[in-house]
Image (spheres, rainbow, N blue to C red):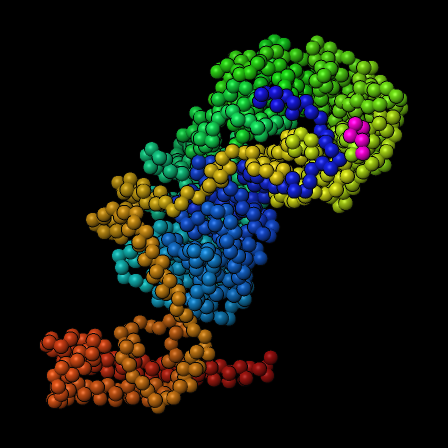
């Protein structure tokens, strides 16, 4: 019954009633995207989830996860990314666009949760690890803090901020130099310190809790020759402890700076020893080819050596350089040659780079890879361990070969696809289950070949193949080397099921001649192929089900065995010129072949026998792009005709029996254009159901026409319907149907827009634009085909595949949900799981790590790690909820309070703070000496009164219960021992004396500040007088 329905579907012509498809029946959309999108520009990586994000210049973001999971996100606006970063292990991706909009993407739901519009130009962006806080630096030098709400996924602004005046300190710099280029949390202290790098070169280590500068270096360093101020263009940490930072400049120079925190912990002492930091003096200057050509350093990435030498990856601006060279530096302080350099030659400029990791499940080993995005959108990968090996051995007597570049490409397009066909069967109930496809998808060859060694043997494993009728979606591709591949695309991963290699007369395989045309008819089990040399092969397949030998498990094929396990016979016919079009009349067993030179051949399949060969005259382009068998009334007789369309949109009718033309003239548009598609439409007339009006549909790049078929046969151009394309060019057209009767026309334009139009009226039913679907007729790397029920597959070179559906129905592709699930839920960090194995290796930093962790380190359960992360978040939430630099209006209001009315509360006075108050917090600088003295005298008097009261308190006669209760309340308020404990009053008296001594110290400091202010005032007056004296001489 199933085969019968399939045969009936294949034998029906395209046609139907006059109404055709309705707008409610169609819904053109992108179902799935496979591969790397064209126009890629930026990268981001979640090392815990092992999710790679690739953003494009048109606002798309591709996600690649483990087990070959993939998903495509589309922003509301087609704007490129400025910054792209994960909130690690939380399923959140942050995308900062060029128009300073911060997009919050929920990866699990693949949903844009929130758009935060930042008021200002974002110049730096950094997420605090193990938290939901983000630092945002802007062009005027300020740093803001944002927090992600874990429930709503909205971004909210925190009160905490770092103004330019507090972090930079020099407000005389030009506005262009004030921008914060990098805000980088310090390793090992991400929640406590951040490094703020300004464009002018200032490097500021900022204490988050202290809200003040801890260390400053860098400064406005000038070029030694031109004396021009250098500008920072990139920066990154150069060690895992945050004691060194490497900074790249716009003139191609790279400096290694030491960073010294103001702390006395063991960690800090190690960092100080490692950095040997001296303000405004770099530790080391790296001289690369970028310095010679003054090429700006756009990006820096450091891979820590785990006890060995670290590797620094340097990307320069290729637009300012004469070569597309990526520089790699081996940083090793314990070798005579401190740095070893390697230049990786690239075929084109590099736009972005990222370090990604792979973990081996067997030995828990981590392996790093360098991923690059090139200017054309191509992505490639290098093995970091191979690069390390080369750098360590390049100076030996037998240096190794250069690291190999591996381009990321879809696995089944080598060799290139030249032609394709898609056959769908939505009613198929046989074949593999969803569990089978899920397993095959996990074992499928990964796009990024980081695990290729482990999956080489089964990377193209296939479902059990016992016949074409058991495949829900059959995809056939002809390749440039002459081979023909059969794929199961029931799930969105093309799974190989069969391979045909052309066999010559001497029984040698592989003709190496590109396949240019394909025709597949599933009912008689026939495949016809034509190649560029004019050879037509007719493959007759065996009766299904095939034998068990037909289940192929790799694309290697069996060259000795050939295709005898599925092919019953092969017949070969030679025609004149490259084959462009093929069609078959099943009733007469006739095969029509159209060639590049305008030759049409009619072949009897049984022989095969050449019945006739006719040359079609054409004024412009004579290549035959389409052939259609039909029947029409000609001069009172039923004629079997063969309609021929050439490249220049010329249409001519031939008589099938003789091959003669039925008219002396051909039908063509007034303005010839490149023809794309031709189809005979058999439409019933509503007024007379027994009467059929046959029409001919012709579509070219500029317009679509509906001709009267009887008139075309007579050489008369009678246009029934016409639609011109204004301002756009059509690049592909085809008809599709629902229930084998309702028909519509699908049009694809070079801009990526898809239109669905009714037939024969050509009215618009639905239209949509698929972002990234840019197709040009001149691009040979584009392969596009469709099924009769509106399923499209477009292959863009070796980069990506678009799966598109036109009908409104449930997706016909299996396991779409599972292959799109890139986020697996919060998991323990893979680095933490395999860190124990690294402890056994004694490296340069092993003792340091041991000191920081303690001599007896215990295993920390995952729950404790989560609690620690929560504690960090709570601590930062408390800090960031406070306005550390309140507006000046608040200070003014406080100053205008009544000076003579002093309310003393010891709890409101911080007497134990011996450190310097950060800029913006104190108000002492705004008060004069008299005000401070008056207040301190009032405080001193009230403190003395309290001491006297405490001394007289025991002499008072009060009821015992009331006396004890009152004293206990006072003690409890001020933190003293309760009733019954000895020495309480004495302790309180001593505490008050200590507070008085500290207040005297504060008074002394205020006096010193006033003296300093007077000194500055005197200097300013002297400078003013000097300026006035010099003014007349100018």
x then y, percent, for residue 1011:
36, 83
Asked whether 837 or 1009 is in front, the reply is 837
Image quadrant where one finds the N terminus: top right
Image location of residue 685, percent across then percent down: 79, 32
Instruction: Look at 82% across and 15% down and name the residue there.
Output: 658
Q: Is residue 956 above or below residue 867?
A: below
Main SS of residues in magenta: loop
Q: Which residues are magenta?
A: 687-693
Residue 646 image position (x, y, % from top left): 78, 28
User: Which residue occupies the foreground of this view, 599 or 308?
Assistant: 599
Q: Residue at x 58, y 13 (%)?
A: 542
Rendered view: 379 above or below 917: above
Q: Quadrant of residue 973?
A: bottom left
In the rendered view, does 86 fall on the left or right side of 423? Answer: left
Residue 1008 lies in magenta, yes or no? no
Please indicate whether residue 527 sits to the left or right of residue 717 in the image.
left
Q: Quadrant of the C terminus?
A: bottom right
Which residue is painted at 51% across and 85% down in the image?
1025
């Amino acid at each position: 019954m199933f085969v019968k329905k399939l045969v009936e579907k294949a034998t029906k012509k395209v046609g139907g009633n006059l109404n055709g498809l309705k707008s409610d029946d169609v819904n053109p959309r992108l179902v799935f995207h496979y591969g790397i999108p064209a126009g890629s520009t930026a990268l981001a990586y979640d090392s815990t989830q092992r999710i790679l994000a690739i953003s494009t210049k048109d606002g798309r973001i591709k996600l690649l996860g483990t087990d070959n999971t993939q998903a495509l996100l589309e922003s509301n606006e087609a704007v490129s990314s400025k910054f792209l970063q994960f909130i690690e292990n939380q399923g959140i991706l942050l995308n900062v666009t060029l128009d300073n909009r911060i997009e919050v993407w929920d990866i699990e739901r693949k949903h844009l949760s929130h758009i935060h519009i930042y008021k200002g130009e974002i110049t730096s962006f950094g997420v605090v690890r193990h938290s939901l806080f983000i630092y945002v630096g802007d062009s005027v030098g300020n740093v803001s803090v944002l927090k992600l709400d874990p429930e709503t996924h909205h971004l909210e602004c925190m009160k905490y901020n770092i103004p330019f005046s507090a972090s930079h300190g020099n407000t005389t710099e030009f506005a262009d130099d004030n921008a914060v280029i990098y805000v980088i949390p310090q390793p090992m202290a991400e929640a406590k310190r951040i490094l703020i790098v300004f464009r002018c070169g200032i490097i500021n280590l900022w204490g988050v809790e202290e809200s003040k500068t801890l260390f400053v270096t860098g400064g406005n360093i000038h070029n030694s020759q031109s004396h021009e101020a250098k500008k920072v263009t990139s920066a990154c940490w150069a060690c895992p402890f945050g004691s060194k930072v490497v900074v790249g400049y716009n003139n191609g120079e790279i400096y290694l700076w030491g960073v010294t925190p103001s702390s006395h912990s063991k960690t800090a002492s190690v960092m100080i020893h490692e950095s040997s930091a001296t303000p405004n003096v770099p530790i080391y200057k790296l001289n690369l080819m970028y310095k010679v050509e003054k090429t700006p350093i756009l990006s820096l990435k450091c891979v820590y050596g785990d006890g060995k030498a670290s590797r620094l990856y340097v990307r320069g601006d290729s637009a300012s350089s004469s070569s597309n060279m990526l520089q790699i530096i081996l940083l090793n302080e314990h070798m005579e040659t401190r740095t070893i350099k390697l230049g990786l030659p690239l075929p084109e400029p590099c736009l972005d780079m990222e370090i990604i990791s792979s973990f081996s499940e067997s030995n828990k080993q981590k392996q790093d890879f360098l991923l690059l995005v090139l200017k054309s959108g191509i992505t490639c990968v290098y093995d970091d361990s191979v690069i390390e090996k080369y750098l360590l051995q390049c100076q030996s007597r037998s240096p190794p070969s250069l690291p190999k570049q591996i381009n990321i490409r879809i696995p089944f397009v080598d060799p290139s696809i030249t032609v394709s066909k898609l056959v769908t069967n939505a009613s198929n109930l046989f074949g593999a289950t969803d569990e089978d496809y899920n397993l095959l998808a996990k074992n499928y060859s990964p796009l990024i070949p980081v695990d290729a060694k482990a999956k080489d043997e089964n990377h193209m494993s296939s479902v059990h193949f016992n016949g074409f009728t058991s495949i829900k979606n059959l995809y056939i591709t002809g390749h440039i080397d002459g081979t023909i591949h059969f794929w199961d695309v029931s799930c969105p991963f093309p799974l190989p099921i069969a391979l045909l290699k052309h066999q010559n007369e001497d029984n040698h395989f592989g003709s190496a001649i590109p396949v240019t045309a394909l025709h597949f008819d599933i009912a008689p089990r026939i495949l016809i192929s034509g190649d560029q040399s004019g050879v037509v092969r007719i493959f007759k397949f065996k009766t299904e089900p095939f034998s068990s030998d037909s289940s192929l498990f790799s694309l290697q094929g069996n060259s000795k065995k050939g295709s005898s396990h599925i092919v019953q016979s092969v017949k070969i016919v030679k025609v004149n010129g490259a084959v462009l079009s093929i069609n078959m009349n099943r009733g007469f067993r006739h095969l029509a072949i159209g060639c590049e030179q305008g030759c049409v051949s009619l072949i009897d399949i049984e022989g095969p026998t050449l019945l006739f060969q006719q040359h079609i005259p054409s004024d412009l382009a004579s290549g035959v792009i389409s052939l259609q068998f039909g029947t029409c009334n000609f001069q009172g007789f039923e004629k079997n005709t063969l309609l021929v369309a050439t490249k220049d949109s010329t249409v001519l009718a031939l008589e099938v029996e003789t091959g003669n033309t039925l008219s002396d003239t051909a039908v063509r548009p007034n303005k010839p254009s490149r023809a794309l598609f031709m189809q005979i439409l058999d439409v019933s007339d509503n007024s007379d159901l027994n009467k059929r009006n046959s029409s001919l549909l012709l579509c070219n790049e500029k317009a679509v026409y509906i001709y009267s078929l009887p008139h075309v046969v007579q050489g008369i151009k009678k246009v029934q319907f016409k639609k011109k394309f204004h301002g756009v060019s059509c690049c592909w057209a085809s008809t599709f149907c629902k229930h084998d009767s309702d028909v519509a026309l699908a049009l694809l334009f070079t801009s990526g827009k898809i239109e669905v139009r009714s037939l024969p009226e050509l009215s618009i039913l639905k239209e949509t634009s698929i972002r990234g679907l840019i197709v040009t007729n001149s691009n040979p790397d584009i392969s596009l085909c469709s099924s009769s029920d509106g399923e499209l597959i477009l292959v863009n070179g070796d980069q990506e595949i678009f799966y598109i559906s036109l009908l409104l129905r449930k997706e016909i592709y299996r396991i779409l949900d599972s292959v799109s699930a890139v986020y697996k839920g919060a998991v323990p960090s893979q680095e933490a799981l395999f860190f124990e194995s690294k402890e056994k290796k004694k490296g340069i930093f092993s003792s340091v790590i041991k000191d920081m962790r303690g001599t007896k380190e215990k295993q920390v359960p995952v729950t404790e790690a989560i609690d620690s992360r929560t504690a960090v978040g709570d601590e930062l939430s408390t800090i960031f909820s406070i306005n550390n630099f309140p507006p000046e209006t608040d200070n003014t209001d406080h100053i205008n309070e009544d000076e003579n009315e002093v309310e003393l509360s010891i709890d409101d006075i911080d007497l134990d703070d011996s450190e310097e108050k950060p800029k913006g917090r104190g108000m002492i600088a705004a008060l004069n000496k008299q005000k401070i003295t008056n207040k301190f005298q009032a405080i001193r008097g009230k403190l003395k009164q309290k001491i006297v009261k405490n001394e007289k308190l025991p002499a008072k006669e009060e009821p015992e219960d009331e006396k004890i209760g009152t004293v206990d309340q006072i003690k409890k308020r001020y933190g003293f021992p309760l009733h019954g404990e000895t020495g309480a009053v004495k302790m309180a008296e001593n505490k008050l004396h200590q507070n008085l001594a500290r207040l005297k110290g504060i008074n002394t400091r205020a006096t010193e500040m006033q003296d300093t202010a007077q000194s500055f005032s005197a200097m300013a007056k002297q400078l003013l007088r000097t300026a006035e004296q010099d003014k007349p001489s100018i």
